[in-house]
């Protein structure tokens, strides 16, 4: 079910682009930690294979966020548009210990049954936080997707030439303008989805159920935004009231 839902999310993302509802020139990628339902499974007990009390989600794992600290649970990985209308393009769910850079390729590469919006000529830049600062991802973006991956970078005395080019672009006026879209697009989008569907903390246990409910939340969000666009109710915040959660 999760694979099918991921493909449907990707297809909906493509539909937004195909109908000209969104601007694809600058896209964004990010993740968010989501707390597991029930008690946490401490690392000491986990190493021993001991489950000290009932109600622990033994599929969940520990992950670290600079803003939230250590969280026992799962992680939602998301790509989105920026600009006037911010919508999810692709999504996936993993345990909290999976690193962001491990999910970049699968989130931006088309499957056998759907086309990737990131391969379209109108896609120019992908903005991401330092968790995606990876040489292989810059190369994948440039060669496979033909987009520029823009991450926060610092200049050092021994910075290699190729990396220095990335630093110069990020620190340029244009680079800063592009990257500034992240905090007003994908970051609030993720928090909005979590708030609308009340998925943090999670209402279910086990990875297959977690993936199902989180991905269905993303898909339903896309459908509601699409409905709003077609009925001229563009403001995504009205979705809360449509779903009876406002």
Image (cartoon, rainbow, N blue to C red):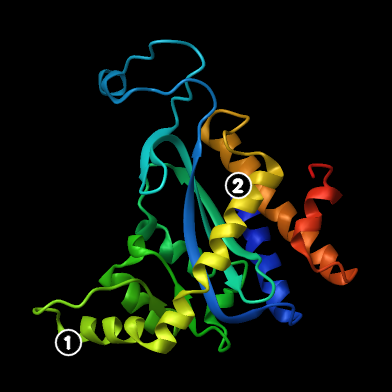
Give the residue drawn at x 63%, y 30%: 203
Per the image, the residue denoted by label 1 is 161
Judge by depth and name the residue closer to the eye, 67 or 90. 67
User: Which quadrant holds the N terminus?
Assistant: top right
Question: Where residue 29 sits: x, y (%)?
Answer: 48, 65
Crowd around label 2: few <14 · some 14–19 · many ≥20 (10 Å): some
Numbered marks: total: 2
Relative horizontal placement of residue 97, taking residue 162 as reference (left or right): right
Question: Where residue 236 sits: x, y (%)?
Answer: 75, 61
User: Could you tell me if residue 45 is visible in this image?
Assistant: yes
Closer to viewer: mark 1 or mark 2: 1
Question: Where residue 154 sits: x, y (%)?
Answer: 23, 74
Give the residue drawn at x 79%, y 42%: 245
Judge by depth and name the residue closer to the eye, 2 or 123. 123
Give the residue drawn at x 33%, y 64%: 130
Per the image, the residue denoted by label 2 is 2
Mark earlier in primary sequence (1, 2): 2
User: Which quadrant holds the C terminus?
Assistant: top right
User: Could you tell me if residue 79 is visible in this image?
Assistant: no
Question: Where residue 65 sits: x, y (%)?
Answer: 38, 46
């Amino acid at each position: 079910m999760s694979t099918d839902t991921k493909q449907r999310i990707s297809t909906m993302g493509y539909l937004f682009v195909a109908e000209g509802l969104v601007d694809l020139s600058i896209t964004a990628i990010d993740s968010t930690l989501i707390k597991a339902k029930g008690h946490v499974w401490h690392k000491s007990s986990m190493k021993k294979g001991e489950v000290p009390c009932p109600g622990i989600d033994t599929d969940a794992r520990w992950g670290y966020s600079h803003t939230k600290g250590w969280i026992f649970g799962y992680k939602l990985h998301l790509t989105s548009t920026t600009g006037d209308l911010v919508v999810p393009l692709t999504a996936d769910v993993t345990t909290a210990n999976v690193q962001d850079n491990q999910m970049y390729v699968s989130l931006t590469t088309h499957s056998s049954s759907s086309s990737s919006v990131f391969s379209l000529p109108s896609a120019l830049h992908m903005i991401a936080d330092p968790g995606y600062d990876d040489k292989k991802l810059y190369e994948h973006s440039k060669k496979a997707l033909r987009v520029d991956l823009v991450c926060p970078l610092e200049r050092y005395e021994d910075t290699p030439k190729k990396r220095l080019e990335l630093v110069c672009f990020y620190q340029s006026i244009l680079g800063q303008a592009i990257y500034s879209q992240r905090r007003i697009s994908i970051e609030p989008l993720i928090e909005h989805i979590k708030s609308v569907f009340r998925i943090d903390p999670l209402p279910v246990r086990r990875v297959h159920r977690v993936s199902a409910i989180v991905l269905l939340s993303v898909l339903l969000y896309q459908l509601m935004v699409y409905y709003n666009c077609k009925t001229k109710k563009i403001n995504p915040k009205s979705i809360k009231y449509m779903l009876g959660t406002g």
